[in-house]
Image: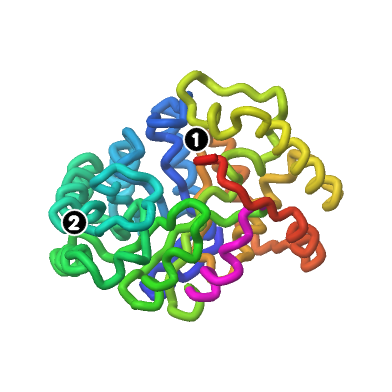
């Protein structure tokens, strides 16, 4: 496993991080806790030292905390997220930060997360949505400053609204944020235009999420794919979207001259090649996926020709909402 600076925090984090949404059982159906525990332990054995969870990920914080307590003394870092108090994802324009992240709510959510995980502190506390309209408004910054001083968190970050990568640049320029988490993948290439350069300029750590586009970039989603009842992917890939994905994946594999079974590796290498990227948090619910994904951290890179070919497969859209 190779490691990179998490912006200017002083932390050195694994290139491949552990995205713990899928193990919480809230929207991804089929996770078994025993297998989730084995997968997370195996990830740590293979050098993964950055784990991303959230208050809204069902049992994820509890499971992550259990594993972290069994690895006390090791250099492992856990990030969690505070949900907006008004429960609106993503944050639309026109909201007051008093509606989304008032100080009392931030503190209460963190205390709940600490109890659920059994941890004494989190390395990174992130807001689960963000709007640059909130820079310089509300009492969230004072609360974050207090929580850092109290030793309950070390650093502050935000998880950028889905497919709104420029809606955080004002916060980055303010100097009040340590990390930014954003979608960046072969299909959603927009962050490379302004977000990633801004993070590089200001020393902000970049946590890439959704490198596989919820499975579309693994090559395993076909027109015949089905999902368990209640699994969010049933709506994410609803209608004719599986057929759309199929066609786009066929185009990528044909241009690169690879098989579908090689697409996940290419997708991870693409995300890792982004400017200022610190870690790519892949969802890894099984030991098999852990071993496959961590193997990509071997110092290898896509060639300029491969990245140029992939640039032509940019496919900007929002399957979460439309």
Disc 1 is placed on an element classified as loop
Q: Residue furthest front?
A: 94
Q: Residue at x 30, y 65 (%)?
A: 134
Residue 10 percent across, percent down from the top left: 37, 73
Residue at figure coordinates x 46%, y 22% from the top left: 230
**For residue 159, above or below residue 258:** below
The structure residue drawn at horizontal position 53% and vertical position 47%, both measured from the top left corner, is 282
Residue 16, given in percent of the width and then of the height, sits at 53, 54
In the rendered image, is residue 76 in sight? no
Could you say which is closer to the camera, residue 247 or residue 34? 247
Q: Residues within 10 Å of mark 2 (few under 14, many from 20)?
A: some
On whether residue 177 falls in the magenta region, the answer is no
Judge left or right: residue 237 versus residue 261. Answer: left
Magenta includes 195?
yes
Check the picture and name the quadrant holding the N terminus. Answer: bottom right
Q: Which mark is residue 318?
A: none
Provide residue 152's location: percent of width, then percent of height: 19, 59
Left or right: 177, with 277 as reference point: left
Q: Residues within 10 Å of mark 1 (few under 14, many from 20)?
A: many
Q: Is residue 212 left or right of residue 103?
A: right
Please give the name of the residue rendered at 60% of the width and 32% of the height, measured from the top-left corner: 237
Question: Label for residue 102?
Answer: 2
State which region is magenta. 187-198
Disc 2 from disc 1: Cα separation: 34 Å
Q: Which residue is mark 1?
A: 285
Q: Nearer the viewer, residue 243 or 55?
A: 243
Residue 157 shows up from this direction = yes
């Amino acid at each position: 496993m190779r490691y990179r600076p998490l912006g200017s925090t002083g932390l050195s984090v694994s290139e491949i991080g552990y995205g713990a949404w899928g193990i919480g059982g809230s929207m991804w159906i089929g996770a078994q806790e025993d297998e989730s525990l084995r997968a997370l332990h195996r990830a740590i054995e293979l050098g993964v030292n950055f784990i991303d969870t959230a208050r809204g990920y069902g049992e994820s914080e509890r499971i992550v905390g259990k594993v972290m307590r069994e690895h006390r003394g090791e250099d492992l870092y856990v990030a969690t997220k505070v949900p907006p108090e008004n429960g609106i994802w993503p944050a639309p324009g026109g909201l007051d930060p008093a509606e989304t992240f008032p100080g009392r709510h931030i503190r209460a959510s963190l205390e709940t997360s600490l109890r659920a995980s059994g941890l004494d502190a989190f390395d990174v506390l992130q807001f689960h949505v963000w709007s640059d309209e909130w820079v310089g408004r509300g009492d969230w910054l004072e609360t974050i400053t207090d929580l850092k001083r109290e030793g309950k968190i070390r650093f502050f970050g935000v998880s950028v609204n889905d497919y709104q990568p420029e809606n955080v640049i004002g916060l980055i320029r303010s100097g009040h944020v340590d990390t930014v988490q954003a979608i960046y993948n072969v299909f959603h290439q927009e962050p490379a235009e302004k977000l990633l350069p801004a993070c590089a300029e200001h020393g902000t750590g970049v946590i890439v999420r959704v490198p596989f586009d919820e499975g579309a970039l693994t090559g395993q989603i076909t027109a015949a794919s089905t999902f368990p009842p209640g699994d969010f992917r049933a709506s994410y890939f609803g209608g004719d979207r599986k057929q759309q994905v199929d066609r786009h994946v066929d185009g990528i594999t044909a241009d690169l001259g690879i098989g579908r079974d090689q697409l996940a590796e290419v997708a991870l290498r693409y995300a890792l090649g982004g400017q200022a990227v610190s870690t790519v948090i892949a969802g890894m619910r099984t030991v098999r996926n852990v071993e496959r994904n961590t193997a990509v951290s071997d110092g290898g890179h896509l060639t300029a020709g491969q990245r140029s070919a992939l640039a032509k497969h940019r496919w900007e859209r929002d399957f979460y909402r439309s």
